[in-house]
Image (cartoon, rainbow, N blue to C red):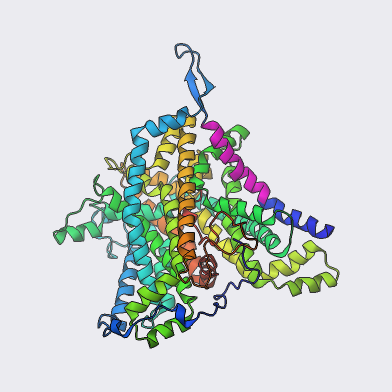
Amino acid sequence: MNAKARAVTVLLTPFFALFTVVMVVPVGYAVWLSLFTEQQSGLGFGGTHTVFSGLGNYAAALGDHAFRDGFLVLLGYCALYLPLLLAGALTLALLLDSALARARRFFQLALFLPHAVPGIIAALIWVYLYTPKLSPVVAAMESGGLGFDFLSPSGALPSVVNIALWEWLGYNMVIFYAALQAVDRSVIEAATVDGAGAWRIATGVKIPLIRSSLVMVALFTVIGSLQLFTEPLILNQGAGSAVTSSWTPNMYAYTAAFARNDYGLAAASSVLLALAAALLSFAVTRLSGRLVRTGRPSRTGRSSLAGRSSRPGRRLPNASRPPLAHPKGRP
Amino acid sequence: MTLSPRTTVAGPAAPAPVRPSRAPSVRAADRRPRGRWLSPAAVNAALALAVLYTLFPLVWLVTAATKDAGGLLAGNALSFEGFDLAGNLSRLASEGDGVYFRWYANSLLYAGVGAALCALISVAAGYAFDKYRFPGKEKLFGLVLLGVLVPTTALALPLYLLASRTGVVNTYWSVLVPVLVNPLGVYLARVFSAGYVPDEALEAARIDGAGELRVFWSIGLRMVAPGLVTVFLFQFTAIWNNFFLPLVMLSDQRLFPVSLGLYAWSGNAHGEPSFYPLVVTGSLLAVLPLIIAFVTLQRHWKAGLAAGSVK
């Protein structure tokens, strides 16, 4: 089938050529860069030259307080953001899926719309809404006796979480809602006949049946969180802001590269970040695969995450069904 | 994980028969009178409250865009008092020799050209993965799926250094080429191809003597058009919202997309409050095309999200 082989080559080449240039090569180059460091020669008059430093940059990054603190910030961010996002999106999806909701199309669109707002603009809008003189919200809160400084060191984390929540709540709700729509209605009818109330059906029937969607959303939310950059950067623009220039690991890498011109350190911290993402993905998919394989019913009666590969033992790494992942995080 | 060859995209696949025993049994002892709080009014009120949260900042953006700096700083931004939208627009057009609309045109160029090419490239690859058998197919597809999981911001720095080496840094190409690749688009295109393009149609064209590429171009691409629009829409949004890559690549203001330009202006606003209305009005104009696109193309983004979440 020579003609078919030619067609496959023609159809796949554009994608894989570009994929190589903008993904494979940069990943390799980042690893390569992370192994070298610039050294002052002599007394610092002779310029610099690049020397091989092995894992020196990794040690330097991991040994740097600022970098480690960035991961603590991410941990705090995820601890606050993930439950809020999942609970919020799931609750809204269940409400929309209940027989009682009206105007479903309008609600879906209205809740989804923040996703159409560029992340940078979402951050700008909210920072203005946090700024005392500009904001009707802060003014209203103060007149109600609620003083909260969104731009203070202790307020920074909730402020960033709120921006992210605003952007992603509706998006993930649509994903959950689509999954709920696919739940076999006869199962729900059976539970109703058994006398289950709406609450019992939601928690006992619907949520277990869309577990794989929950896992996917959680996974991509965490990977997206690792890349947290834009929102804190805007918070950082304000004079005397609580957010430092290395508040998140991604900001640390950016500062290392463009403020300190230390490309080795920047590459090492980027690689560490990517490794963290890979480990997380692996852990989540393994864990959920086990969950699904324990024979709990999945939506189609078979595991959908650790899917049924056509050839047993040839399972693809993961992300069998990625929801549209973090488009905003795409450089 | 391989996709089952017959995946429907619009609408869920026929669910596997579920034996009644699969349904969690609810014993009579668990019966409780249904809570009063689950009334239609309560459900819709809760949804409306969530909508208030998602739409309020956008409403503020609209009203704030009609204020001058003094009106904004007076904090009564939610009323239409001191209506000066025309003034803001004319200042927006004149600031920096009309650089804002240049940014806007750049964004349209990056997002329009980038998303069109990306959609075509993704659909071609997705179609090939769906319709042909070739050695190493699933391994290659696994590589594509791995690409979905790479944190893209981690690539920006090595991309920048590669671009500096090759001298394309601070050019249109440095921002346009990286966004032509979207592994997730290939994944979606494969799902859409399986759902929309029946093999029989391709066979018929082959019997009529059309070559393989001709079959793709005139049959496959036409049938998978709704999926093409979906990939285009999501990529257009991603590029329009793109901030990190241009931030790293571009130093020439005249090449900025609108996101980066607004960021530069908002940096000025802290010392020079007259920039506030410019940032707000500029943000409003920058959000409009996407809102219009999402309102008019609802079927497509729902299909895209459903294809990602439901198989």
Residue at 83 percent across and 67 percent down: it is B210
Residue at 36 percent across and 47 percent down: it is A74
The magenta-colored residue range is A16-34
Dominant secondary structure of the residues highlighted in magenta in the image: helix
Q: Quadrant of the N terminus of chain A?
A: bottom right
Query: Residue most toward the bottom?
Result: A193
| Pick the front one: B141 or A193 | A193
Instruction: Residue A276 in the image: state x and y as whole percent.
Output: 45, 45
Q: Is residue A50 left or right of residue A16?
A: left
Residue A12 colored in magenta in the image: no
Q: Is residue A141 visible from the viewing direction of this image?
A: yes
Q: Is residue A250 above or below residue B36?
A: above
Instruction: Residue A79 in the image: state x and y as whole percent.
Output: 32, 53
Question: Which quarter of the picture shows residue B229?
Answer: bottom right
Residue at 55 percent across and 60 percent down: it is A320
Q: Is residue B172 left or right of residue A296?
A: right
Q: Is residue A268 above or below residue B175?
A: above
| Pick the front one: B13 or A229 | B13
Query: Residue most toward the right?
Result: B209
Question: Which quarter of the picture shows residue B71?
Answer: bottom left
Question: Which quarter of the picture shows residue A193?
Answer: bottom left
Query: Residue most toward the left?
Result: A145
Q: Is residue A100 above or below residue B262?
A: below
Instruction: Residue B193 in the image: state x and y as whole percent.
Output: 66, 67
Q: Is residue B99 visible from the viewing direction of this image?
A: no
| Pick the front one: B208 or B51 | B208
Instruction: Residue A210 in the image: state x and y as whole percent.
Output: 45, 69
User: Tag count in the figure?
Assistant: 0
Residue A30 colored in magenta in the image: yes
| Pick the front one: B97 or A31 | A31
Query: Residue most toward the top?
Result: A43
